[in-house]
Amino acid sequence: MPAASVDARPVGDAVTDAVPWGAVWGQGAAVAQLQAAASDPESMSHAWLLTGPPGSGRSTLARAFAAALIAEPGDEAAMRQVIAGTHPDVTLLRTEQVIIRIDEARKLVERAYFAPSIGRYRVIIVEDADRMVERTSNVLLKALEEPPECTVWILCAPSDADLLPTIRSRVRAIRLVEPDVADVASLIERRTGVSAQIAEQAARHAQRHIGMAQRLATDVDARERRDETLRAVLRVRSVADAVEVAGTIVQVANDDAKALTAERDDAERTSLLRTLGIADGAPIPPTVRSQITALEDEQKRRATRSVRDGIDRVLTDLQSLFRDVVMIQFGRAAADDTSLVNRELADELRALAAAWEPSRTLVVLDEIALTRRNLERNVAAALAIESMLITVATGRTP
């Protein structure tokens, strides 16, 4: 299976009578702006950038917009095809690797120059535009500078700062808003059927990331791992503690990645062998060994991305933890702790806030941000997290 491909999973709750904007949740202003553009060709831009924090619904909005552009008004069958990722005039680049490769970008640009086959536009969606290095971004730049007729680009990224200035200057940007915790909790409760208490806790711990909130709400093990990790970090007092906890964090991230990808990897391998006419357990002929190796390489890159994402989620949780400490230290936390992300740990957080100077907490937050940047530069995860936790233990950068 290719690392970047059309993702055929449903992206929303429903398709409305005319246009599938009902799949988009909590982004009324952005929907209104894109609806107006889709209905008025003269005001259309050839390239759009949808920005917002993870979980804000960037890709859902991108597909709804694509459906409105490609399908004629009232053609719900075509709209459903776009949402499902099966319409021939929509192409989705959704990488499962650490970065988008330059060869993937080149193929995307080639496809952009094809005329629409049956729809009004050809739409190219790049979900992870922030995962393009400069060389790869420059491949897209020419297509954005000289846009093909009837082709619309929709780029998605957490922030416009994640893209090159030359890219930003050639797109029309729309910033998505962050929903309230209460709104996310209500959505999760309706979608999953969990109790209001679990839904609220999941939405708060996920910091309004809808996908992560849904996972926390429905996965007891994920909730327990999060709690255990934060409590372990709060207990770090020495370099030895830092090394031990760092190893645990990386191991948990690796175990999670294996659990998430193992079944899919096996299914992909079985499917490929069946396509090649090789029976289960039969030896692999040398003539097709390269195809098996290519699949395994793609799966390894995907696993690397999954581990990175898992560690990044831990860092986000730790930021929330020490953000809570700073709130307490500066008297910004409510007396009933309702303003804390991790209010279940309120006693431990207040004890830490009393024991540390605010400057030390800010150093730790800076070190967490530095760790995230170091991991993006391919620094060994265990070493990067050890360094961060040594700062937690000592209050000093290593």
Image: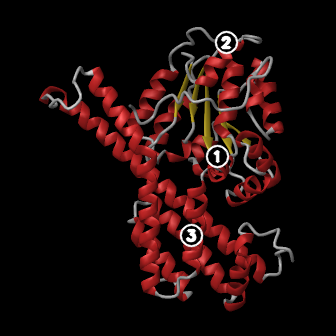
Which residue corresponds to the image point at 81% horizontal and 25% vertical from the top-left?
Answer: 36
Residue beneath disc 2: 77
In the foreground, 378 or 289: 289
Q: Is residue 209 above or below residue 128?
A: below
Looking at the image, is mark 1 or mark 2 earlier in the sequence? 2
Q: Amino acid at mark 2?
A: Ala
User: Residue at 76% of width from left, 83% of height from top?
Assistant: 329
Which residue was labeled with disc 1?
211
Q: Amino acid at mark 1?
A: Gly
In the image shown, does 223 or 12 lie closer to the viewer? 223
Does the image show residue 300? yes
Marks 1 and 3, Cα distance to the nearest angstrom? 21 Å
Marking on residue 228: 3
Residue 319 position in % (x across, y down): 63, 68
Residue 294 located left or right of residue 378:
left
Q: Which quadrant would the N terminus be assigned to in this image?
A: top left
Residue in the image at 77% along x and 57% along y: 197
